[in-house]
Image (cartoon, coloured by chain):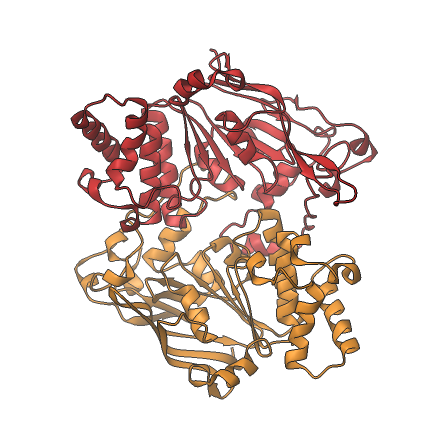
Amino acid sequence: MSKQNILEVEQLEVIFKTRDGIVQAVNSLDFSIAAGETLAIVGESGSGKSQTALAIMQLLAKNGEAKGMVRFGSKNLLEMTATEINEIRGEHIAMIFQDPTSSLNPYMTIEKQMLEVLERHRKMSRKEAKERVLEMLSLVDIPDPERRLRQYPHEYSGGMQQRVLIAMGLLCQPDLLIADEPTTALDVTVQDQIKRLMRELKEKSNTSILLITHDLGVVAGLADKVMVMYAGRMMEYAPVDEIFYRPRHPYTQALLKAVPRLDQPGDYDLHPIPGNPPNLSNLPAGCPFRGRCSQAYDACIQMPEVTEVGEGHQLRCHLGESVE
Amino acid sequence: MQPLLKVQDLHVHYPINTGDWLHPQTTALKALDGVSFEVAPGESLGIVGESGCGKSTLARAILGLQSPTRGRVLWRGEVLNEMEPAYLREKRKELQIIFQDPVASLNPRMNIGEIIAEPLRNFYPRMAAVQIEERVKGMMQLVGLLPSQLNRFPHEFSGGQCQRVGIARALILNPRLVVCDEPVSSLDVSIQAQIVNLLKDLQKKLSLSLIFIAHDLSVVKSISERVMVMYLGKVMELGPREEIYTQPRHPYTSDLMRAVPVPNPKIERSKMDLSSYGDTPSPLGPPSGCVFRTRCKWARERCAADVPALRRLDGQAQVACHFAEELDLQIHSQK
């Protein structure tokens, strides 16, 4: 892969100051996204996946603080002033969220909300802007876009709202689209539409996608690279086929087994991971997964280093090459 | 054997105001439109469908929380929706529910012990405190909670543990049937499997009947011996899971199966070449004839004219499709 990286994250830390002390949500995270590439960050609640996305866009809650390097172009996004980052948001990096209904303004027509983006970032005439909006809406398969533009969000179904948000995100042809659980709140058949749309987008444009999700099935269809996170740390980071067909980390393996599968008709058993997700304000020493890991041993008291176990395949586990 | 629960031709219609102030007009939203099925003692039935299919209305109707427009709910041979309130209250002991959001369904000001004991206090006000505590502790053990955590509050627990509390509360009255309304949808994958396995164990141990409601076919697969697929207030397919999962006969069932993403990149990528699914029509103006026809790639003229009845084919499963025998429904699992 000699493609140019459009986003490089180095040693990203996110901490929150709470009444009960400091909570470290993201811990020394490194990753990069090349042009046209889709990186999926997978994890369960409390893994830090959403906070990573929010930190990149400087959207952390007031008590949150991000440290490290998020290189976009030649600049560190974390050090930008509010004016500077506003030029990036929407124009170079767009973001879509889990709940499409609460991401749209219920008092504004879809037309007004979409034109707002172009008015803010592009010096287009109204006519040009409207043409661009219509073009984007038909790209995301909104039928009868002329009429639909004049409608309000509540007149759209959940799936259509999410498609509008994707269209809105793409208006300025951003270099990077951050999608935080874009399919989670939708019905399965609607999820499929959104996945197709993102897949098409990937194939037709050169937009890179950072996909944040807990759903390994969604990842399988869309991602080029996958990072598995647990308790704020990267556990495994590899090309998509490596993660699914040759998972190395015990957590990744356990997660893949826990998913109820429909591609194996006769198998009715589920294999849960014992224990509960970690409490970030009270993490045990060493590997955060060790309490739930079936292969844990003495060394796991120490935090494992990240090692390279294959081409582009990184692993944070003491077992390294010898994971079963 | 007499079925525990029998639902006969159940209709629930909600009047919706569709006019404006000048032209007032109400339209009936048919949340349930002629649903019939049975649940045998000790059996577990999965009910699957997307938003607007009527699955939650059905749960409410079974528990007597929603009175039907037409049709009957029979509980052990007695008509539940015609019971006197005092008698219905007695019967409620036998019918319990577990909710989707485990945290929101627990009172944050009560400790775990009080929450689990509340149904006992409610139905057996004379029960001695010692006896209540004993029952609560036994129940906590049964659902995998430490009895020593009796005095903790819900906020000290994770989502999965809160759902265990919800299960304990539902089981403390020794019900015959528990309706689980999307009990694992808001939990992490690793915890989902824990809760599903727990419910499965308890079902066997206590010979409970379970109705497990879900929005997709994946979770239901492991827990339900029979599966019912619903769409816009109607039953599309109902049958034993072995048949439903290996050989779905209704086009909607096979669409639902295909739409569930599987953690296998090759399958997921190959699915992208298959046709897409249309949008669900508004439940206020469902299509004539077969309600699924607007999204069905096999739809023909007859589907717009006649409503397909639920009928049995060669196996055990019942299907509401005119052309079920002729369709070649390919699902990805048959690769």
> Quick check: B302 above or below B124?
below
Residue B149, image quadrant? top left
> Quick check: A127 above or below A287?
below
Q: Where is residue A311 in the image (x, y as percent from the top left)?
A: 42, 71
Q: Position of residue A20 (x, y in %)?
A: 24, 64
Is residue A207 something one can see in this rendering?
Answer: yes
Which of these two is toward me, A33 or A71? A71
Residue farthest along the bottom direction in this orientation: A74
The residue sitting at 63% across, 54% down in the picture is: A159
Q: Position of residue A287 (x, y in %)?
A: 25, 63
The residue sitting at 73% across, 70% down in the picture is: A133
Residue farthest along the right direction in this orientation: B301
> Quick check: B301 above or below A203?
above
Which chain identifier belongs to the red chain? B
Q: In this view, does B275 lie to the left or right of A18?
A: right
Q: Position of residue B7 (x, y in %)?
A: 56, 20
Colour seen for chain A? orange
The residue sitting at 80% across, 36% down in the picture is: B300
Quarter containing the C terminus of chain B: top right
Which of these two is toward me, B277 or B3? B3
